[in-house]
Amino acid sequence: MDGISDQPSDDWGPFGRPLFNDPEARALSRVGVVDIGSNSVRLVVFDGAARSPAYFFNEKVMCGLGAGMSETGRLSPDGRRRALSALKRFALLAEGMDATPLTAVATAAMREAEDGPEFQEIIERETGLKLWVVDGTEEARLSAQGVLLGWPEAEGIVSDIGGSSMELAELKAGSVGKCATSPLGPLKLRDIAKDKKALAGYISDHIDRLATDMGTDHERLYLVGGSWRAIAKLDMARRDYPMKVLHEYRMTRKSLTATLKWIAENDPDELRSMTGTSSDRMSLVPLASEVLRQLVSTFKPSEIAISSYGIREGLLYEHMPQSLRETDPMIEACRFAEVSSARIPGFGRRLYSFVKPLFEGADPERRRLVKAACLLHDTAWRAHPDYRHEVCFDNATRANLGGLDHPGRVFLGLALLHRYKNNRSGSRFEPLFELLSEEEITAAEVLGKAMRFGSMFESQAPDRAAELRYSAKKNKLDLILAHGAAPLFGEVAESRFASLAKSLGVETEVKTADG
């Protein structure tokens, strides 16, 4: 990895070992990453699907290492104390979770502070953690790779804001292009500019330089970092947005501008209580808001998207073989869930073959969601039967799934709800249905009821026991039962088939290979 100093002799970068020994492997061995930023220190332990790793453990301590550094040139003494305490805890936790050796990456504060090298030695001596200090452009590149982990087809510009810096990176054709760094982190801005006019001018100068370096022809802006996420939470609150998942949350330039104005006009403590944001983070939001206002005004993106993935995920992406990078993160996560949680792993693929005739004319994105739903259709079987539909919906809409936007989450959740329950009326999830069109709601219902019916053939492969033939033009749905499969079409199966037909609004005919 270019830009990271003190490479180990085996050339595996900061991990010191290969993470993906087998390019065909679907599961990731437990991996721990420590991110030492200017404002926070965080431990994340990844596990699960190799292409879409889940957060086995995630803990953050707001240490403020970079506080006051613009005036002193040194790390905050209190920040050092708190960071070292957190790192000692993280090292012990990692041992208990079998997530060693930990990889520790540090950014702006550690690379710029006069006493950074000294503190680095103390950390290694007292915790055993070997620190990898990345420069600004490398930080930008790794953060952009984190975005690619969740959005394989992402194109636009990534902005990663930390306490002491803000980085930009270009994404194009699935790879990282130009990268740039700036001193526009809110901790640093708090230290160097007390006058509002001087602050605005300072930010403007650096934004203009970034625009010259990166160009402004970017349709989408991806936001990475705690301060950006805090602003997105406030945008959700102002809009009364029904979903609280930050990853892939989308904002228009107009909506975001209104939110930034709303933040400036309201009491920070009241805003903090609305979103559960920490006081340390909220104190930085007004400064981060001014940076974002000027960034959006200069670059003029058509859409702004929040990414929960950044430098930590970018480190994993760095090690992925190209064949794994090219797989679909959502589908891989669903496959992993089926293997680890379903009663009959592998059945989802056959269920997909069974229901696919109902979606032959659908676009690739719809077929992708159909496949994901089939893989997940039985992963909540351990829940109480009366609540499986709710568990399914919650899992789909709140799970750590990359490559899935908010309407897609709701579509998937609604389809899985109907896998276990015919009627969605009166559901506590109804506000979320507003993210879907009527056509999408109907399609999700049809998919759910098709899976509910197909599961009646679970003792055999449904695509071998029976076949669906659907003609929208003829307004007809035929069921062809294979030789010897007629007994499987009992009263419950017949009722579920009728329910599916009712949702489609079609006539039905049942045929058997036995004549």
Image: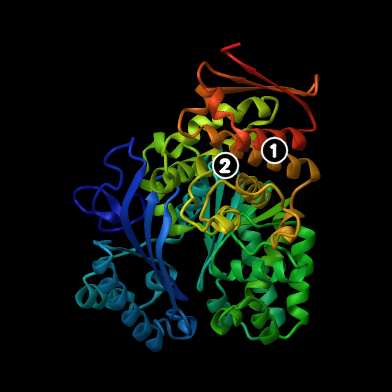
Left or right, 308 with respect to 459, comes to: right
Q: Which residue is mark 2?
A: 373
Looking at the picture, does residue 36 appear above or below residue 155? below
Please give the name of the residue rendered at 65% of the width and 17% of the height, measured from the top-left corner: 511
Location of residue 454 by image quarter:
top right
Residue 224 at x, y percent in the picture:
55, 61
313 or 155, nearer to the observer: 313
Residue 15 at x, y percent in the picture:
28, 55
Of marks 2 and 1, which one's residue comes earlier in the chain?
Answer: 2
Residue 35: numbered disc: none
Decide if residue 391 is in sight here.
Answer: no
Please give the name of the residue rendered at 36% of the width and 38% of the height, measured from the top-left corner: 321
Please give the name of the residue rendered at 64% of the width and 64% of the height, measured from the top-left corner: 244
Looking at the picture, does residue 37 appear above or below residue 115? above
Please give the name of the residue rendered at 78% of the width and 73% of the height, measured from the top-left corner: 261
Residue 446: numbered disc: 1
Location of residue 110 by image quarter:
bottom left
Q: Quadrant of the C terminus?
A: top right
